[in-house]
Image (spheres, grey):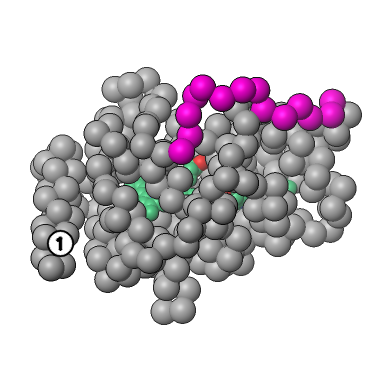
Amino acid sequence: MHMNRLYRVLILLLGIALASCSQDDQASATEKAVKSETSAVGGSKNLSGGVISTAEAAPAKQSPELVQKGKELYGQNCIFCHQPDAIGKPGIAPSLTNQEFLMTASDKFIMGTIRDGRAGTGMPPFAHLGRSGVEAILAFLRDHAKRPNISAKIDKEKQVHGDERLGKLWFDQICSTCHGMNGDGYARGGTGTAIGKVGFLGKASDGFIRETIKVGRTNTRMLGFSGPDGMANMADSEIEDVIAYLRTVPSK
Ligand code: HEC
Ligand code: HEC
């Protein structure tokens, strides 16, 4: 029964390997395929298959005073790693003004991450800025949003019931090329964040993880994994398998 699904993983992996240069080792094959794909479309790729739709109205308006205060605090505390306009830098810090990130991440997720940081990664805690300081930075980041936030909807989605053993197969072969074995992130020399650590998993809902896997993040190396334009066209059940596996990683 599991055999059919196992075959699908292997066939998709073979496709990814063939799509990249043959002299590359397996570890960098996925990254290479992504780079060529990204440059081929001028770095702006929009995938279908997730909840995100372009037909939605304008995002919530931020107070200009708060945005200005947040911009100053951002410049003093965050710009060094997250870069001007928070566009991020591969292997240093993720983008915080990426449109899919701003659409899918809740205020609670962003503020909690700023306050607590992510233990075992390069993201330090900023509890000393106080709630008002963190709120100002949030307003500055949200001011970059072009579309409304959908976190209330996706955070309510049902919890996963995937097969963690199949998920591990996907993770080890595909996700780990960027996110590191066990999702250790930059520490393993990758360009993806530490999605196997409690600092991320303790704050991210299944819906947020699911949507991120499906649609990816435009202009970063995280391409979506759903639909014919995806890195690999993963079935919904296969995405559930990966999330189920991710949830088990911190205890291992
Ligand atoms: C080619 C590299 C690459 C591959 C392959 C890849 N990712 Fe990512 N992923 C990234 C990057 C880079 C980011 C962060 C975007 C940024 O830097 O702004 C990211 C972000 C994420 C996030 C959000 C994490 C956060 O900190 O908010 C999740 C969840 C995620 N990826 C899951 C996966 C899963 C599951 C797979 C395998 C099915 C996968 N990724 C494969 C590069 C990759
Ligand atoms: C010393 C470098 C550094 C500084 C300074 C820093 N960060 Fe980070 N930040 C990181 C890294 C590295 C990550 C990714 C951690 C991981 O691998 O999961 C991150 C992740 C994040 C995330 C999660 C993004 C996502 O995709 O889920 C948020 C939100 C964030 N930082 C906000 C901030 C804010 C706001 C500041 C300033 C108050 C700040 N950071 C300062 C390095 C830094």
| Above or below, 71 relative to 237 | above
Secondary element at image label 1: helix
Where is residue 209 drawn, in percent x and y?
47, 53
Question: 23 or 94: nearer the eye?
Answer: 94
Quarter of the image for residue 185 reads bottom left
Which residues are the magenta region?
Answer: 51-64
Q: Position of residue 103 (x, y in %)?
A: 58, 37
Residue 247 shown left or right of residue 199 in the figure? left
Please say whether residue 57 is one of the residues in the magenta stretch. yes
Q: What amino acid does circle 1 point to?
A: Leu
* Residue at the spot 47% in from the left edge and 73% down from the top edge: 250
- Image location (x, y in percent) of residue 47: 37, 31
- Residue for badge 1: 6
Instruction: Identify the residue shown where x is 11% and y is 50%.
Output: 11
Main SS, magenta residues: loop
Callout count = 1
Residue 207 seen in this snapshot: yes
State whether residue 168 appears in this view. Answer: no
Residue 13 is left or right of residue 132, and the answer is left
Q: Residue furthest bottom?
A: 252
Number of residues whose C-alpha sits closer than 10 Å to that of mark 1, classed few (under 14), some (14–19) or many (20 or more): few
Whether disc 1's CB lies below 8 Å from ligand 1 is answered no
Could you tell whether 173 is left or right of 68 in the image? left
